[in-house]
Amino acid sequence: DADIIIRSFDNVIFQMHECNLECVADRFLQDDETSDDWLLCLPESGAVLEVLFRFVYPRPLPDLEKLEFEDLLLVAEAAEKYRFFSAKYACQLALR
């Protein structure tokens, strides 16, 4: 029953609920992404989006300290870009 499909640059598909995204992300769409009513193509990798989207639904959060440093930076950049504030804060803690 997802109402939006998100595709990463490496063609990983995520079926999401727009209302959940709106609750956790201050800004999700940007001018440079291509989208229509149900499909959103993002420039991030599927691995980055997988971690980021774990913050959208009520389930255990990922252990960011287990990520490689470079991967953690990519997740932190995406969290900042889309304003996933809880993910951004978690990344800041993991980077200390």
Image (spheres, rainbow, N blue to C red):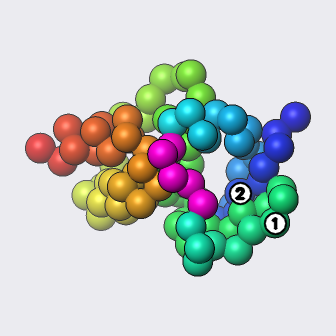
Q: Which residue is mark 2?
A: 6
Image point 72% across, 63% down: which residue?
40
Q: Viewed as shown, does residue 21 lie left or right of 40? A: left
Question: Is any atom of residue 58 visible in this view?
Answer: yes
Question: Is any atom of residue 94 visible in this view?
Answer: no
Image point 12% across, 44% down: which residue?
96
C-alpha distance separating marks 1 and 2: 11 Å
Q: Where residue 49 sits: x, y (%)?
A: 54, 54
Type of amino acid under label 1: Asp
Q: Viewed as shown, does residue 38 lie left or right of 52? A: right
User: Which of labels 1 and 2 is toward the front?
Assistant: 1
Q: Viewed as shown, does residue 32 lie left or right of 96? A: right
Residue 57 lies in what quarter of the image? top right
Type of amino acid under label 2: Ile
Instruction: Label the magenta part by its dominant secondary structure.
Output: loop
Vertical placement of residue 10 versus 84, above or below:
below
Closest to the observer, 22 or 61: 22
Numbered range of the magenta stretch: 25-29
Circle 2 packing at 10 Å, graded few (<14), some (14-19), many (20+), is: some
Q: Secondary structure at mark 1?
A: loop
Q: Where residue 92 sits: x, y (%)?
A: 22, 44
Give the farthest residue toward the bottom: 32
Q: Where residue 64 sits: x, y (%)?
A: 33, 41
Q: Which quadrant, please, contains the N terminus? A: top right
Q: Which residue is mark 1?
A: 36
Closest to the observer, 40 or 12: 40
Residue 37 lies in what quarter of the image? bottom right
Image point 59% across, 73% down: which residue?
31
- Residue 65 lies within the magenta run: no
